[in-house]
Image (spheres, helix red, strand yellow):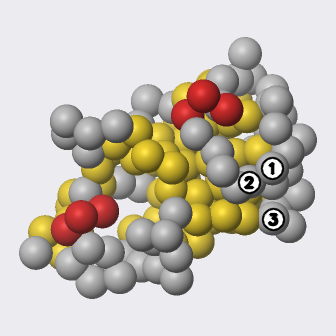
Amino acid sequence: QVQLVESGGGLVQAGGSLRLSCVASGRTIRVSTMGWFRQAPGKERDFVAAISWGGASTDYADSVKGRFTISRDNAKNTVYLQMNRLKPEDTAVYYCAESTTTSRTSGLSPADFSSWGQGTQVTVSS
């Protein structure tokens, strides 16, 4: 069983940047598709970004394209989400997730992921 721990969230002004990290322990994630999701209060958990096992393929929600970048360092068993030009509507709890059943990065939903972190809060003030 893999454990995922997110960090890097916080309070930032609109236009600012944050870098989220997701460290995996228990086993390697180097052959897994990894994703980031977010959930605002009263809303569903939404896809943000995904990256293939080798990092060659990535995909983003339309709302974050051009502002967020997902990356991974398999040697460190870590996945990152660089968030730039943050907007108040980016405010949410951000979750890291692992999929061991799909190699694609597009059209993913929470149901495609079997392991989740506890989440990290991102708050963007206007």
The residue at the point 66 percent across, 50 percent down is: 107
Q: Which mark is residue 105?
A: 2
Contact flag, marks 1 and 2 (Cβ < 8 Å):
yes
Q: Amino acid at mark 2?
A: Thr
SS type, badge 2: loop
Give me the disc on residue 83.
none
Q: Residue at x 70, y 55 (%)?
A: 106
Quadrant assignment for the C terminus? bottom left
Pointers 1 and 3 in contact (CB under 8 A)? yes
Residue 114 on image: x %, y %: 66, 24
User: Residue flagged by tag 1: what amino acid is it?
Assistant: Arg
Q: Position of residue 26 (x, y in %)?
A: 74, 23
Q: Position of residue 82 (x, y in %)?
A: 52, 69
The answer to which of 125 and 75 lies nearer the viewer is 125
* In this view, the mark in front (1 or 3): 1
Q: CA distance from mark 1 to mark 2?
A: 4 Å
Q: Residue furthest front?
A: 107
